[in-house]
Image (cartoon, rainbow, N blue to C red):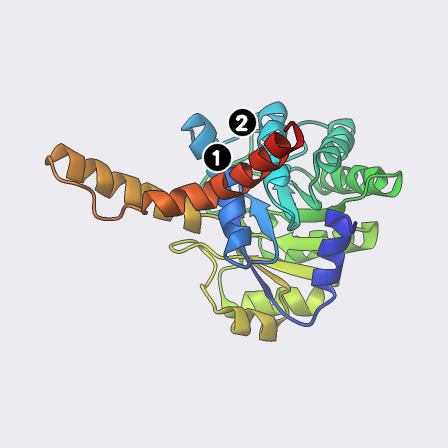
Amino acid sequence: MTSPAQQLRELLAKDQCHIMPCCYDGLTAKMIQQAGFALTFMSGFSVAAARLGLPDTGLISYGEMLDQGKNICSAVSIPVIGDGDTGYGNAMNVYRTVKGYAQVGFASVMIEDQVSPKRCGHTKGKLVVEQGEAFERVAAAVDARNEGQDILIMSRTDARAVHGLDEAIVRGQKYAELGADIIFIEAPESVDEMKTICKEVPGVQMANIIDGGKTPVLSPEELHAIGFKIAAYPLTLISAAMQAIEQSLQALQKGTQPSAIMAFDKVRKIVGFDDYYKEEERYSASRR
C-alpha cells in the first residue's frame, strides 16, 4: 500500500490548492474523509481545546499530542499532517518528535520557530527564536526524515508578526534550502504579502485561513492563483461544534429539545456501527 507520506507527495504534485479542514480527534478526522476531502491536519489549537479545555499556549505536551495523533491516523486512510509545535525542546527533541510522528502514521509534521511555550499564530504575545536555533530545528527534522522516517517536513515561521515580512521570507527561503518539503509563513496581513511569499519563497506553500484572523480570507481558487498548494482551515470544525453545543445547552436550559441534532441513525453510521456489525457477523459465522 502507498504510505501516507507518498499519498501526500502525490497530492502536492497536482496543480491545485487543496482544501484542508483541520481535525482534533478520530471522529472529526473520519468525518473529513467521509466528506470527500483528500487530506487533513491535526490542529494543535483544537486538540488543546478539545482534549484539555485549555488555550493553545504551549500547555499540551508531546506525549498528549502523539497519543491524539495515533488515534486520528488510525481512524482514516487519507494523509494527516501533525502539528509538532516547536518540536518540544532543542534539536534532539525535534528529531525525536519527527520520528515519533512518523511512527504513529502522520504523513507530515509541522515544526515552528516560536519560543517555547508557543501560542496560536493569530494571537498576541508571540516570540520567535534566533535564526540559528530556528535553522537547527529544521535541519534536525530533515535529518530525521532523511535517516529513515517516511514523513514530510513542514517548516513554519511566525517571524512576520515579530520582525516583519522580510525576516519571515529569509527564514522561509532558508527552510527550503535546508530541505523542508512544505513552507508555512504564518499570518501575512495582506494579499500583496501573500503574493510576495509565493513569489520569493521556493517550494510548496500553505495558507492558514481563520475567520477573524490576520490573513485575508480568500477562496481556494484565489489562493491557487497566488501560488498556494494547501489552504488549511484550523478552527472551522471546532468553532462549528462549539457553536452547536452552546445552542443545544441553551435549549436544554429552557426545557426544549435542541434543533441542531443529527439523527441517531446517521450518528451510528458515521461512527461505524454498520461496518462493525458486518465484521462481527463475519467472525460469528466462522464459529458456526
Q: CA distance from mark 1 to mark 2?
A: 8 Å
Q: Residue at x 52, y 53 (%)?
A: 34
Question: Is residue 210 toward the left or the right of residue 197 in the image?
Answer: left
Give the farthest residue toward the left.
254
Q: Classify 10 Å Cα crowding around label 1: few (below 14), some (14-19), many (20 and above).
A: many
Rendering coords of residue 115 (x, y %) = 60, 34
Q: Nearer the viewer, residue 282 or 142?
A: 282
Q: Residue at x 72, y 43 (%)?
A: 131
Element under disc 1: loop
Q: Amino acid at mark 2?
A: Ile
Q: Nearer the viewer, residue 284 or 241?
A: 284
Give the farthest residue toward the front.
288
Is any part of residue 128 visible from this angle? no
Question: Is residue 125 toward the left or the right of residue 103 in the image?
Answer: left
Rendering coords of residue 19 (x, y %) = 55, 61
Quarter that holds the C terminus:
top right
Q: Nearer the viewer, residue 280 or 137?
A: 280
Q: Amino acid at mark 1?
A: Asp
Question: Is residue 171 toward the left or the right of residue 158 in the image?
Answer: right
Label for residue 56? 1
Rendering coords of residue 114 (x, y %) = 61, 38
Q: Residue at x 85, y 39 (%)?
A: 143
In which image quadrant can residue 109 be found? Answer: top right
Q: On the image, numbered disc 2 is attached to which residue? A: 60
Give the farthest residue toward the right.
147
Asked whether disc 1 touches disc 2, contact meaning CB atoms under 8 Å apart, the reply is yes
Rendering coords of residue 151 (x, y %) = 77, 44
Is any part of residue 229 visible from this angle? yes
Q: Nearer the viewer, residue 95 or 105?
A: 105
